Amino acid sequence: MQSDSSARFSYSDKISISYGRPLVQFDPAAEARLLWKIDLFIVPTVSLLYLFCFIDRANIGSLAWRGISNWKTMTTTPVSQVFYVSYIIFEIPSNMACKWIGPGWFIPALSLSFGLVSVATAFVHNIHQVCGVRFVLGIFEAGMMPGIAYYLSRWYRKGELAFRLSLYIVMAPLAGAFGGLLASAILKLPNFGGLHEWRMIFAIEGIITCGLSVISFFTLTDRPATAIWLTQEEKDLATARVKSERIGATEVLDQLDVPKTLRGIFGPVTLVTSFIFLLNNITVQGLAFFAPTIVRTIYPKNSVISQQLHTVPPYVIGGFFTVLFPFLSWKYNRRLIFFIISAPLMKGGYKMFLASNDPNVRYGATFIIASGAFSFGALCNAHVAANVVSDTAKSSAIGTNVMFGNIGGLISTWSFLPFDSPIYHIGNGLNLATSSTMLLWSIALLIWMGVDNKKKG
């Protein structure tokens, strides 16, 4: 098992046997202290950056909430679509640039850039300007999810990675909750620097993002060897732990290499997992649109702020399961089994949508869907990262997975069409079909990996 192309490569679902067993045994107490230190210095920073990445992306919905003329149509057509076009195109190039420049500089720079774009959005006056800033926002946000996943893979072993990924990916559903609370608080202000209503939301949230980005320039470090907050012994241990899972590798961070990049992109596990993530993201992004619609149906006479607050609970439940399933994945050394558990939850929720027109039943269904849908971000990224060897292949595999996921996000913009409201049979039927397909592909991937590993001995 000397390279990504090795004929003896074994695919990993049971994390403890990935690439064979480590040749070096480490002091458990020293490892525990090191993990706690890494968790404390790295995870909170990247989690906050990703939280505001998602808030800056989703705050376009504030315009629809405020009843801006024709904005509901804009949100479901060009505004959302132009964002996803740039987001998809720059996904893999951005993650390769992250490896080349170094995530300690690249991730804060991306965050600062999309924070400035959010501030600029406060000053738009027509649909053309909105589409322009959303396209630029997609360029800068494209590298955040895969970039952070790749960055964490430099610090954690494969068995530890999914849970750590969940600690920042959970910020996506929590952004739906926290973003609604923050927007509600901002709207209580009479003005901000001459800006009013939705313009205040973009400006204030963008300024917060920029402030966090500047701080992160000083707190994030590229890799263990350059971390000033680790002792030399801890640096050596952190590097040795990651290297111990790469049997035959002479270095943890290799040089960019085209063949390895292509192996990361076109590996069978990468492609199938990425397709599952594509299907999942149709649901995740569609739910962000559909949940407010359900709330408005149940509470049509409530204020805008009250309606926003009622969208919070499903995201809180989704956030809980975003962390729970990857945590269990870490403890039980399995990933695909949680793919197989999550998909039926999504199916059950969409069956409720299609079977009932009762707004309260449909609101309850959003909780069930969120509990199954949001954990796939961490599980899919961890799965593709665990099934390549080199650092270069890992970077391209994660970028591919997130790119496919955002193709699903683009598809979701056509899922809930105005003429199908308020029941949305087409959108809910599509999501029932995607969750069913996810279940079938997850089972097939688990079986194929087991059979292929047996053939390789």
Image (cartoon, helix red, strand yellow):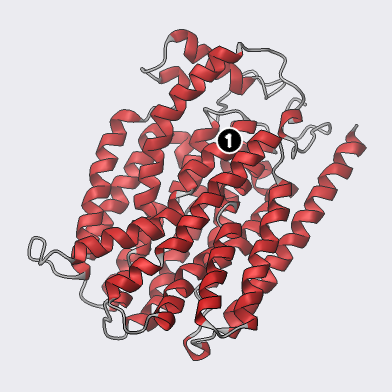
In which quarter of the view is residue 132 placed? bottom left
Amino acid type for the residue under numbered disc 1: Leu
Q: Which residue is at the front of the view, 83 or 423?
A: 423
Q: Is 367 placed left or right of 19 in the picture?
A: left
Residue at 62%, 38% (x, y): give it: 393
Could you classify mark 1 by the number of other residues whose Cα lies within 10 Å: few (under 14), some (14-19), or many (20 or more)?
A: many
In which quarter of the view is residue 194 placed? bottom left
Q: Is 411 placed left or right of 387 in the picture?
A: left
Please indicate, yes or no, whether residue 120 appears anywhere in the rendered image.
no
Residue 159 x/y as whole percent: 64, 32
Residue matched to label 1: 161
Q: Is 63 placed left or right of 332 in the picture?
A: left
| Numbered disc total | 1
Residue at 17%, 65% (x, y): give it: 188
- Helix, strand or loop for disc 1: helix
Residue 181 x/y as whole percent: 30, 60
Residue at 51%, 77% (x, y): give it: 360
Residue 375 x/y as whole percent: 58, 51
Please indicate, yes or no, whether residue 169 appears anywhere in the rendered image.
yes
Residue at 78%, 61% (x, y): give it: 440
Give the answer, above or below, for where 135 lies relative to 14.
below
In which quarter of the view is residue 437 placed? bottom right
Viewport quadrant of the C terminus: top right
Q: Which residue is at the front of the view, 339 or 143?
A: 339
Q: Which residue is at the front of the view, 86 or 406?
A: 406
Question: Farthest residue toward the bottom?
Answer: 419
Give the answer, above or below, for where 388 lies relative to 345.
above
Q: Which residue is at the front of the view, 265 or 317?
A: 317
Residue 356 x/y as whole percent: 61, 83
